[in-house]
Image (tube, rainbow, N blue to C red):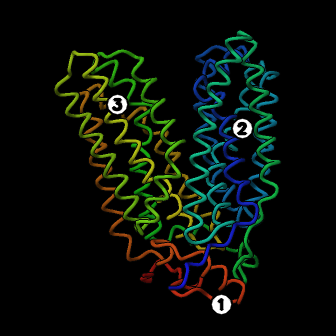
Amino acid sequence: MKKAEKPDRIPGQWALPVAAAVNGVGTGMYVPFTLVFFHYVTGLSFTTVGLVLTVTGLVGIAALPLAGAAVDRFGARRVQLALYGVRAAGFAIYPFADSLAAFAAVALVTAAADRAFPAVQSSLLGEVAQGAGRDRLQAATRALQNGGNGAGALLATLVIAFAGPTGYTYAAWGNALSFALAALLLRPLRPLPAADGTAARRAGAGYRLVLADRPFLVVTGANFLNALSYSALSVLFPLFIVEWLHGPAVLTGAAFTINTVLCAAAGVFVGGRVRRAGARRTRAAALGGGLFAVAFLGQIALGTLRPHSGPVLGGALVAMVLVYTLGELIHSPAAEVLAVSAAPEAARGRYLAAYQMSWSLAKAVAPSLFTALLALDGRAPWAVLVLTSALAAALLIRAERQLPADAVRPVAETVVRKARSEGARPAGIAPLSSHHPEGTRS
C-alpha cells in the first residue's frame, strides 16, 4: 500500500499564527477595558469617549471597500504590514491626544485600520495556503490569536494593578509595540505564486463582480446571521444573567474565561477532527450554527425555569457555554475558509472586504437589537437567535451546489502545489473565468 504523501510546507507558515498571537496580545490589552482605557489615556469623559468610539467605528467601516481594492492591487501582505503600522502609530499617539479633536482624529484612523484588518488577514491566508492547508492554518491562527487576547487582558490587568492609572498609558504603548512586533514577525511569510494572469487582472476587478455573485452573497448573508450569535456572548449574555436571571455578575466573567481558554486550547484539535472527518466546509459551518441554536434553546429553557439555586444556575450556564464554544470552534474556521476559497483570486480582496462587512454590521446591530428584545422578554432575543442560526444553516446548505467545488471540499495541498508547478489546473478546480455568478459551479 502506497504511503500517503505528506503535504508541502507553507513558506514561513509559522509567521501568520505567531504574528496573530502577538496581535492578539495587543488587542487583548485594551478591548476588555475600552472605555476606561481611553478615558484615562486621553483625559476625556466616559460619555465623550463612548460617542467618539461609536461614530469612528461606524465611519471606519467605510475603509473596508478601500482595503479590499488595495489588496487586489498590491497584495494582502503589503496591506497587512501597512495596517500594522497605522495601528502601532495610533496607539503610540493616543496618550498625547488629550483634546477632543486630536482623539477623534486618531480614533478614526485607528478604527479604519482595525475594521479592515480581519478582511486583509483572511486575504493573506488565501495567498499563502491552498486546499486543506488553509483550514489548518486558519485553525492555528485563530487559536493563537485567542490565546494572545487572553494573555493581553491579563498583562494589562497586571500593569494597571501595579502602575495605577498611569498603567493605561503603558498599556497603550505596549499595544503599539505588539503591533510593530507582529509586523516584523510577518516578514518571512511569502505568498504562493499567483495563477496565470491574476496579477495583471487585479486592478481591473471591481465590486460589481462581488455584487453579481449571488452564491457568495448568500454565504455572506448567512455569516451576518451567525455573526449575531458571536455578539451574544459579549452583549446579551451579561444582561440576561443580571437582568433576567438575577444571577451574580461573576458568572459573566466565568463564561468569557471558559470560552477564551477553550478557543485557545482546543481550536486546533477540533479543527483537525473536522478536517479528518472529511466534512464539507458548508456542512461544518452549518453544524456550528446548529450548535449555537442548541445553546440558545437551552437559554430559553433556563429563562423559563429561572432557578434560584446558585450551583444549578452556574452549572447550566457552563453547560450552555461549552455547547456554544464547540459551535464556535466548528463554525469559525470552516466559514472563514469557505469565504476565502469561494472568492476568485483576482478579486479576493474585494470579496473578503464584502464578507467582513457582515461581521461589522452584525456588531453594530446587535446591541440595540438585543436590548430591545430583552426589554420585551428575556427569552425573546434567544428565540430570534435560534431562528437566525437555523436560517443561516439552511442558506449554507442551499448555496453548496452553486459554490466552487474546491471551496466546499478542500483539494489536497500536494495536488494544488504540483499543478501550480506544472502550470496545470488541479482536477475539480474551475478556471477563474468560470467563477461566474450565473453558472453552476459544482
For marks 2 and 3, give the one nearer the viewer. 3
Work out which residue is located at the far left of the displayed protein and give it. 305
Q: Callout 2, which amino acid?
A: Thr
**Circle 2 crowding by C-alpha within 10 Å: few under 14, some 14–19, many from 20:** many
Q: Which mark is residue 424?
A: 1
Q: Secondary structure at mark 2?
A: helix
Taking the image as shown, residue 185 lies to the left or right of residue 121, namely right
Seen at 73% across and 39% down, the residue is 109
Secondary element at image label 3: helix
Residue lying at 42% horizontally and 24% vertically, measured from the top left: 252
The percent coordinates of residue 101 (x first, y second) are: 75, 25
Q: Residues within 10 Å of mark 1 (few under 14, many from 20)?
A: few
First of labels 2, 3 by sequence position = 2
Considering depth in this image, is 239 or 269 the residue closer to the camera? Answer: 269
Residue for badge 2: 110
Residue beneath label 3, please? 318
Residue 301 position within the rendered picture, expressed as x and y whole percent measured from the top left: 19, 33
Disc 2 from disc 3: Cα separation? 35 Å
Q: Answer whether labels 2 and 1 touch (C-beta < 8 Å).
A: no
Residue situated furthest front in the rendering: 1
Q: Are marks 3 and 1 in contact (CB under 8 Å)?
A: no
Give the number of the mark in front: 3 or 1: 3
